[in-house]
C-alpha cells in the first residue's frame, strides 16, 4: 500500500480525533457490555460500513475513469428485494443471494451501457439512479416493508466476537478486492483502462469487458450495503435507503487519494476516506444541527479537490515564490 | 445537418403522440384546461431546465439546481414572513444570489479545472444543507402580495386561465431562446460545447462563456425557486428534491446532446411537456402508482441516450 497518498486524509483524521480527544468527553472510551464492545469509535466504524462498502466498489469504477451514480438506488432495490423475500417466507440464504444477485445484475446493466455501448458513465448510471428508486418503490408499493427474522437481521445488527458484524463484512470485502487487485492481473487491467483506454486496448486489454465487470462489482458492493442498511432498521425504506450515499461514496474515494481522472485505485484510502466522513459527521452531530454536516461536506469536497488540482498547486507555489 | 435534428423530431413526435393518446384514452384529457395546467404545474421544472440546457450545451453539467430551488424557497419565505422584507426586494436578492452562486461554481470549474459534476455536487450539498439549517419546517407565506401573485390569472375568473408562473416560464423560455440564437454569448456556447480547443483557437471568449453558463444556470435555478415559492405560497427546504435529475432528463429527452454543442431550447420545452404529460396520464389512469413516472422517464432517457449514441457513431 502506498502511504504517501494517504498523508492528507490521515492528517485530517488525526486532527479530528485530536479535536474529539480534547473536546468530546468519553470519545475514546470502550465498554464491554454483555459480551459486546461499545464506544464512539466502534459506533463510527459501524455507521461508516455502508459507505465503506460503496466506496470500495466506487474505487474500482473511478479507477477505470468512470463514476457510478446509481449505487444509492441499487441499495434501495437490494433492501426491498431482501425484505420482500423474507416476508414471503423464503430461506434467509436464498433472500440474501437473490438480493445480491439483483444488485449485481443492476450493476452489470450499467456496465453493459458503459462498456460495450460506450455511453458516458455519468449518463449511463443516471438512468438507473432515476428509475432504480422508482423500481424499488414499485416493489415495496411505496411502503416501508418491515420484517422480523433474527438470522436475516444479523447482517446489520449482529455482533461477532463483540464487534458489529458489518465491520467484518467490510474487512472481508476489502481483503478479497485488495488481494485480487494486487495478486492478479485485475488491478493492472483496471488501472490501465483508466490511465489510457486506447493504449491498453491496443496492448490487448479487453477494456470493455473490464468496465462491464467493474460496474457489476460496484453493484454487488451496493447490494451488500443495502442489505446492511435494511437489516439495521429492520425495514426496507425505498424512499430514503441510500439517499445521497452515492455522493458520500464518491467523496470517500476522492478523499482517499484516488484521482477522479482514473488510472489509480487506492482501496485502503477509500476506507480511510469513508471513516473520515463518518467521524466528521459524528463530531458535528454532537454539536450543531445535523444538516450542518451537508454544508461542511460541501466545503470539504471543494477543499480536497482544490488540493488535488494541479492549477491550484501552481497558484499556491507562485504565490509562495512571490512573497 | 439533417440527422442532427432527428432527436428533436423524435421528441416532437413522442410529445404529440402522448398528447393524442391521452385525448383518445380519456375524454377529459383533450380539454384546454389540462394543457394549461401542464404549464402551471411544471413551470419550476421548466425554468430550471432552461438554465441546465445552457450548461449542457456548453458541455458541462449542473447538479445543484434542485437544491438551489429548495434554498431559495425557504429563505424567501423566512425573509418575507419573519423579517418582513418586501417581496420585490426578496426576489431581487434571491435572483442576485443565484447568479453569484452559479458564477462562483463556474469560476471553480474554469480556473482550477475541477470536474463540473463534483463542484455542482458540492453546491447541491451546500444549498440543501443551508436551507435545512435555516428551517426544517415548511413555512407558509401569508403576505398579501404573494397571495395575489399566486391567485392572479389571465383572463381572471375564467375556467381556462394562465397563471403567473406559466407566464414566468414562457417569458424565461422566450428570453433564453433569443439569447441563444441572436447573441454572441449564445453562439459561443455552441462553439464551446462543440469543441473547447477549437473555440479557444478561434479566439472566442471561453472563460467568459464557461463561467457565464453556470452563472446563468444559478440565476435560472433561483428563478425556478421563486416560481416554486409563488406556486406553493410556501417555503420548504426539502422542496424539489431530485429536480436536477428530472431537469437533466427533460433536457436530454428534448434532443440536446449530453456531450454538448447540439440542441435547442424548444426541445427542452417539449421534454418538460413530455414529463408533465406522463405524470398527468398516470394520474388519469388511476391504478398505476406514481412511481411509474420515474421508471418511464428512465426508459425514455435510455432510449434517447441510445439514439444519441447511434447518431454519434454514424457521424464519426
Image (cartoon, coloured by chain):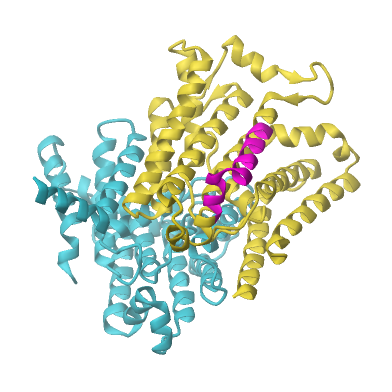
Q: Which chain is cyan?
A: A
Looking at the rendering, which quadrant does residue B163 occupy? top right
- Residue in view at x 60 percent, y 28 percent: B227
Residue B61 coordinates in the image, percent (x, y): 49, 51
Q: Is residue B126 left or right of residue A305?
A: right
- Is residue B14 visible to us here? yes
Magenta stretch contains residue A87: no
Q: Is residue B227 left or right of residue B219?
A: right
Looking at the rendering, which quadrant does residue B153 occupy? top right
Residue B177 coordinates in the image, percent (x, y): 64, 42
Residue B151 coordinates in the image, percent (x, y): 70, 17
Magenta stretch contains residue B185: yes
The secondary structure that most of the magenta stretch takes on is: helix
| Quarter of the image where the N terminus of chain A is located | bottom left
Q: Is residue A198 above or below residue B199?
A: below
Q: Which chain is yellow?
A: B
> As rendered, which of B152 and A77 lies closer to the eye?
B152
- Span of residues in magenta: B169-190
- Is residue A45 visible to us here? no
> As rendered, which of B269 and B147 lies closer to the eye?
B269
Amino acid at each position: 500500500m502506498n502511504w504517501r497518498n494517504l498523508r492528507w486524509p490521515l492528517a485530517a483524521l488525526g486532527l479530528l480525533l485530536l479535536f474529539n480527544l480534547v473536546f468530546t468527553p468519553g470519545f475514546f472510551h470502550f465498554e464491554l457490555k454483555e459480551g459486546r464492545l461499545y464506544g464512539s469509535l466502534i459506533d463510527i466504524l459501524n455507521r461508516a460500513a455502508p459507505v465503506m462498502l460503496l466506496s470500495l466498489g466506487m474505487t474500482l469504477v473511478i479507477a477505470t475513469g468512470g463514476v457510478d451514480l446509481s449505487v444509492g438506488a441499487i441499495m434501495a432495490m437490494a433492501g426491498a428485494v431482501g425484505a420482500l423475500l423474507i416476508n414471503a417466507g423464503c430461506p434467509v440464504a436464498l433472500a440474501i443471494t437473490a438480493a445480491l444477485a439483483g444488485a449485481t445484475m443492476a450493476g452489470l446493466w450499467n456496465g453493459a451501457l458503459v462498456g460495450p455501448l460506450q455511453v458516458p458513465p455519468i449518463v449511463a448510471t443516471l438512468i438507473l439512479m432515476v428509475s432504480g428508486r422508482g423500481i424499488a418503490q414499485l416493489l415495496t408499493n411505496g411502503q416501508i416493508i418491515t420484517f422480523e427474522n433474527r438470522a436475516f437481521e444479523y447482517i446489520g445488527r449482529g455482533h461477532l466476537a463483540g464487534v458489529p458484524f458489518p465491520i467484518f463484512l467490510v474487512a472481508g470485502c476489502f481483503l478479497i478486492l485488495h488481494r485480487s487487485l494486487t495478486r492478479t492481473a485485475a488491478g493492472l487491467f483496471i488501472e490501465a483502462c483508466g490511465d489510457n483506454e486506447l493504449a491498453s486496448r491496443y496492448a490487448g486489454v479487453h477494456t470493455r469487458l473490464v468496465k462491464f465487470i467493474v460496474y457489476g462489482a460496484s453493484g454487488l458492493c451496493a447490494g451488500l450495503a443495502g442489505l446492511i442498511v435494511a437489516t439495521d432498521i429492520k425495514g426496507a425504506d425505498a424512499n430514503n435507503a441510500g439517499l445521497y450515499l452515492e455522493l458520500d461514496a464518491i467523496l470517500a474515494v476522492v478523499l482517499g487519494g484516488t484521482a477522479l481522472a482514473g488510472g489509480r485505485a487506492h482501496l485502503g484510502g477509500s476506507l480511510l476516506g469513508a471513516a473520515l466522513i463518518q467521524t466528521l459527521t459524528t463530531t458535528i452531530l454532537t454539536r450543531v444541527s445535523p444538516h450542518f454536516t451537508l454544508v461542511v461536506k460541501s466545503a470539504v469536497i471543494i477543499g480536497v479537490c482544490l488540493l488535488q488540482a494541479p492549477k491550484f498547486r501552481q497558484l499556491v507555489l507562485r504565490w509562495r515564490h512571490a512573497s | 445537418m439533417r440527422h442532427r435534428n432527428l432527436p428533436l423530431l423524435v421528441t416532437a413526435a413522442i410529445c404529440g403522440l402522448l398528447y393524442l393518446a391521452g385525448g383518445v384514452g380519456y375524454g377529459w384529457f383533450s380539454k384546454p384546461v389540462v394543457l394549461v395546467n401542464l404549464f402551471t404545474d411544471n413551470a419550476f421544472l421548466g425554468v430550471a431546465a432552461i438554465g441546465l440546457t445552457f450548461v449542457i450545451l456548453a458541455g458541462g453539467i449542473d447538479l445543484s439546481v434542485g437544491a438551489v430551488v429548495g434554498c431559495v424557497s425557504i429563505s424567501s419565505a423566512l425573509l418575507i414572513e419573519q423579517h418582513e422584507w418586501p417581496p420585490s426586494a426578496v426576489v431581487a436578492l434571491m435572483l442576485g444570489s443565484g447568479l453569484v452562486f452559479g458564477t462562483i461554481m463556474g469560476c471553480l470549474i474554469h480556473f482550477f479545472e475541477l470536474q463540473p459534476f463534483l463542484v455542482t455536487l458540492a453546491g447541491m450539498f451546500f444549498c440543501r444543507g443551508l436551507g435545512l439549517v435555516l428551517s426544517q419546517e415548511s413555512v407558509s407565506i401569508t403576505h398579501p402580495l404573494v397571495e395575489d401573485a399566486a391567485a392572479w390569472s389571465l383572463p381572471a375568473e375564467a375556467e381556462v386561465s394562465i397563471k403567473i408562473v406559466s407566464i414566468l416560464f414562457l417569458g424565461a423560455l422566450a428570453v433564453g431562446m433569443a439569447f441563444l440564437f441572436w447573441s454572441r454569448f449564445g453562439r459561443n456556447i455552441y462553439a464551446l460545447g462543440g469543441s473547447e480547443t477549437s473555440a479557444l483557437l478561434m479566439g472566442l471568449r471561453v472563460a467568459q462563456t464557461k463561467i457565464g453558463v453556470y452563472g446563468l444556470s444559478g440565476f435560472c435555478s433561483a428563478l425556478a425557486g421563486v416560481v416554486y415559492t409563488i406556486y406553493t405560497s410556501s417555503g420548504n427546504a426539502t422542496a424539489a428534491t431530485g429536480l436536477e435529475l428530472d431537469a437533466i432528463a427533460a433536457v436530454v429527452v428534448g434532443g440536446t446532446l449530453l456531450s454538448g454543442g447540439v440542441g435547442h431550447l424548444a426541445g427542452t420545452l417539449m421534454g418538460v411537456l413530455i414529463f408533465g404529460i406522463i405524470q398527468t396520464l398516470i394520474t388519469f389512469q388511476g391504478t398505476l402508482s406514481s412511481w411509474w413516472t420515474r421508471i418511464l422517464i428512465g426508459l425514455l432517457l435510455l432510449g434517447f441516450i441510445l439514439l444519441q449514441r447511434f447518431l454519434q457513431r454514424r457521424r464519426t
